[in-house]
Amino acid sequence: MRRVVKMLWLFLIAVCSGHEMSAQTDPHFSQYYVYPAWLNPALTGSFDGDYRVSGIYRTQWGNLSSPFSTPGLSAEFTTSKNSNFGASILNQKAGDGGYNYTTAYGSYAYTGVRFGANEQHRIVMGMQLGIISRRFNPSKLTFGDQWNPITGYNPGNTSMESFSRTSAVSFDAGAGILYFDAQPGKKANIFGGFAVSHINRPDDKFSETGNARIPVRYTMHGGVRLILTDVLSLTPNLLYMFQGKAQEKMVGAYAQLKAFPELDVNVMLGANYRFKDALSPYAGFTWKNMVLGVSYDVNTSDLGRMAGGSNSFEISLSFTGKRSAKTPEVEFVCPRL
């Protein structure tokens, strides 16, 4: 255990020491742990229950005329055959041209690799298959030849600009692996994973040449759940992604308090810091089988100041259908939160 903890902190220090960061191709979430299909397909079914439905909504650059908005919805199902299944859909809309980036995936996770005492050290392998659809509406765009130096912009002027295509659909695939310590009653439970998205390099039909490919996205994530008291736990966590020349580095921690045990209510408070981008405080609560969370990104980058200090907001909700009979463990240790 000490060796694993040491490796985790060394990785955290390595992440913190980086400097470069730029925007990535894919949408991103501050509450990345709520939307497991986007983070790592090996997380499919990582809960104690028969099924889970999760929804998330993110909006950013709200002071712009057409801000970014990204809703996502996922459903997961567990089985007793060492296999979990899931499906997810996400749509990002942005800009005056009605640009839409939509993904739809099916995911599978194999959970049969277990070892150690009572087989509570677990390795999960997952895969994901689906499509990426991108499109925009050129009728909502404005062009230079629609402007008159005297009268200004005239939407009645027909633009000579033309586009070879306004939509594109590509097949996409990804894979991931996850380790977590599921032993209940411990003071510290380690979890961590690695995922590769766009592993087949889908065609990027919107590129200048029309034959470019979407770059592979690599994701590393991990953390440790620390039991501080009978009613309080703390979960430091980290995330590192890179795609092409872009990087995203995030560290944070969340405290979970059993505020009203008789009502089965837990309160969660915490924050994430995305390096050279934003600080994201988080608050949420669990009630029986439901988890509700909200976060607010406070921009710290030069881009945020250029956009007039516009920040981002996220809200998430998930519901888990519990098993009718309790599992053999005293407590299910979730490898995400």
Image (cartoon, grey):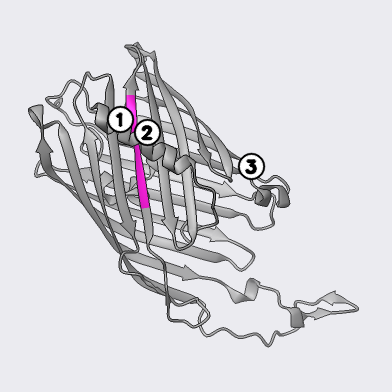
Q: Which mark is residue 201?
A: none
Which residue is at 23% across, 20% downward? 186
Q: Is residue 321 above or below residue 91?
A: above
Residue 220 within the segment the image draws in magenta: yes
Separation of disc 2 and disc 3 at Cα?
A: 25 Å
Report which quarter residue 22 is drawn in.
bottom right
Q: Give the secondary structure at mark 1.
A: helix
x, y (%) of residue 314? 52, 41
Closer to the observer: label 3 or label 1? 1
Which residue is at 54% across, 43% downward? 275
Which residue in the structure is indicated by mark 3? 300
Q: Which residue is at the front of the view, 82 or 299?
A: 299
Residue 115 shows up from this direction: yes
Q: Give amino acid for label 3.
A: Thr
User: Magenta residues?
Assistant: 219-225
Q: Which residue is at the front of the view, 313 or 110?
A: 110
